[in-house]
Amino acid sequence: MLKTDRPFRLRRCQLAVPGSSEKMMKKASGLDVDYVFLDLEDAVTPEEKKPAREKIVEALNTLDWGDTTRCVRVNDPASGYCYGDIIDIVAGARERLDVIMVPKVMGPADVLFVDKLLTQLEIDLGLTKSIGLECLIEEVEALVQVDEIASSTPRLEAMIFGMGDYSASQGIPFAELAGDGDYPADIWHYQRQRIIVACRANHIDAVDGPYPDFNDPDGYRRECRRALLLGATGKWAIHPNQVAAAQDIFSPSAEEIEQARAIKAAYDDATARGLGAVTYEGKMIDVALIRMAQNVIDRADVIGA
Ligand code: COA
Ligand code: MG
């Protein structure tokens, strides 16, 4: 299993669902997706924000979500909505809510505010399970404190790179948002590296944010691959037609799993016989390769492959 004390949740794909839309929440509950987040932030207009709280509570309490993890994205801690969002959602949905997602955190204090509020609610409501927490890194202020944010509380399970707001925060032109603009490399290379290293160092998940053009499957797959190759565990989907691609790309392939298990078996066999240097298919297996194989095996085990 993965080496972490935090509850394990699959995050190969996190589907964004507007919390103001009963229709889309119903649709989302029937999809084969690891994770949904019902949104109170940018997908919901100011007039709909408070009424949407009730719709989300109703959707959490009445729909059959199966194995899908249920998260709610509240409004950011600098808004007037954040505390009320959290109180109403947690009090209304109780154990039927798994995780709260916080956007636009500026530093660890924002995460700790939500952490403390959740602790108070858990005590006051007598909840029988702890609610998880994850946050978006989408402001330059957050990126420069990403290590402090990542280690701020054991409740934090994941950080997401939100490239839309991040672009605005850093002053990156709109045209670069899809990741294939004029910049002579991957425009998100630095930010992804920075965030993913902070996540891995704190044993939390790193998730890549949205790819808005849901009619460009090739572009979406390319962005999934770029995030995967740096160590991300998943990507957002904003439309049901992106879900299968993310869940496929963020799962090890049958070939990778077979190879990883064979390498591990060859290594275990050789070490049991007291051999130091181990070969597999004519090449030396070093200990670093075993760690990489173990990563694949761990992922395969949790996915059930
Ligand atoms: N979650 C659940 N269902 C969704 C969905 C989503 N994110 N996006 C679309 N659907 C549903 C539609 O309701 C429609 O259902 P139906 O076949 O039962 O009528 C079906 O999937 C096909 O949708 P389509 O007609 O192709 O798209 P649309 O015009 O209805 O919606 C968007 C397009 C972009 C408005 C919609 O995908 C959306 O709201 N996405 C999420 C946006 C969001 O949360 N943004 C904030 C985070 S970045
Ligand atoms: Mg945002």
Image (tube, helix red, strand yellow):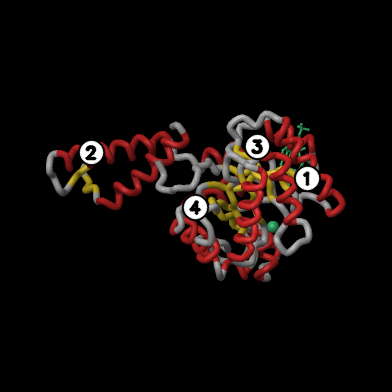
Q: Mark 2: is the Cβ under 8 angstroms from ligand 1?
A: no
Secondary structure under the numbered disc 4 in the rendered image: loop
Residue to which mark 2 is pinned: 266
Which residue type carries mark 2? Ala
Which residue type carries mark 3? Arg
Gap between marks 3 and 2 measured at Cα: 44 Å
Secondary structure under the numbered disc 3 in the rendered image: helix
Marks 1 and 4: which is nearer the front?
Answer: 1
Marks 3 and 2: which is nearer the front?
Answer: 3
- Between 294 and 240, the one lying in front of the other is 294
Q: Position of residue 206 (x, y in %)?
A: 52, 53
Residue 59 found in image quarter: top right
Residue to which mark 3 is pinned: 96
Residue to which mark 1 is pinned: 53
Residue to which mark 4 is pinned: 204
Residue 192 numbered mark, or none: none
Instruction: Please tell me whether residue 259 is drawn above or below residue 289 in the rendered image.
Output: above
Which residue type carries mark 1? Arg
In the image, taking residue 46 as reference, residue 9 lies left or right, namely left
Marks 3 and 4: which is nearer the front?
Answer: 3
Secondary structure under the numbered disc 1 in the rendered image: helix
Marks 1 and 2: which is nearer the front?
Answer: 1
Pick whichever of labels 3 and 4 is earlier in the sequence: 3
| Point 53% across, 41% down: residue | 10
- Between 72 and 33, the one lying in front of the other is 72
Gap between marks 3 and 4 measured at Cα: 22 Å
Instruction: Please tell me whether residue 145 is drawn above or below residue 29 in the rendered image.
Output: below
| Point 59% across, 52% down: residue | 134
| Point 73% across, 64% down: residue | 78
In the image, taking residue 203 as reference, residue 179 lies left or right, namely right
Q: Position of residue 218 (x, y in %)?
A: 60, 45
Q: Mark 1: is the Cβ under 8 angstroms from ligand 1?
A: no
